[in-house]
Amino acid sequence: MQPLPLHSQKAIVWRGFMAAFIVGSFFFEEIGPSDPVTCIVKGIRYESLLRNQLIPALQQRGCVDSTIFIQDGTPPHIATAVNQLLNLHLGNDRIISRHFPTAWPPRSPDLNPCDFTLCGYLKDLVYEGTFANLFELKNYIT
């Protein structure tokens, strides 16, 4: 008899698309007993990713002042800490999201073609592969 896991391993990844470059891949993980473990996205984790990964990456490229940040209105994206951080670094006028002057219209293919075209295409590429473990999956995604 060989024990098999009930669910396959998974990764939750965030990636930003800019006109000239891609920011990321940033994985949502916690330190487990032996290896990193995928965790759900909560407001505090999302805010940490923006503060420690995205903002420094944009600052390094010198494009914080020209970035327009677009995100949907899922609960982690509209957490108070996230809104305050984005407002601090980008300002109210360069954020398209719920609870900002320019709201993100849900299911709008005109506003965010990456959600409807590029992300779907990338997911198809990842789903057609087979991976022995989470490390291989993350390398393939990256």
Image (tube, rainbow, N blue to C red):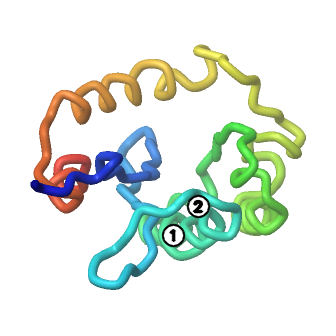
List x then y, in percent, for residue 54. Answer: 51, 64
Residue matched to label 2: 64
The relative height of residue 97 versus residue 26 in the rendered view (above or below) is above
Image quadrant assignment for residue 120: top left
Mark 1–mark 2 CB contact (< 8 Å): yes
List x then y, in percent, for residue 45. Answer: 60, 68
* Left or right, residue 82 beside residue 49: right
Amino acid bearing label 1: Gln
List x then y, in percent, for residue 44. Answer: 68, 70
Image quadrant assignment for residue 26: bottom left
Q: Earlier in the sequence, mark 1 or mark 2?
A: 1
Quarter of the picture containing the N terminus is: bottom left
Q: How many marks?
A: 2
Residue drawn where x is 70% and y is 51% of the image: 77
* Left or right, residue 57 beside residue 103: left
Q: Is mark 1 on a helix, strand or loop?
A: helix
Residue drawn where x is 59% and y is 15% of the image: 109
Residue drawn where x is 19% and y is 57% of the image: 3
Image quadrant assignment for residue 24: bottom left
Residue matched to label 1: 59
* Left or right, residue 96 beside residue 135: right
Amino acid bearing label 2: Val
For label 1, the crowd category at 10 Å Cα-Cα, with few meaning under 14, some 14 to 19 and many 20 or more, is few
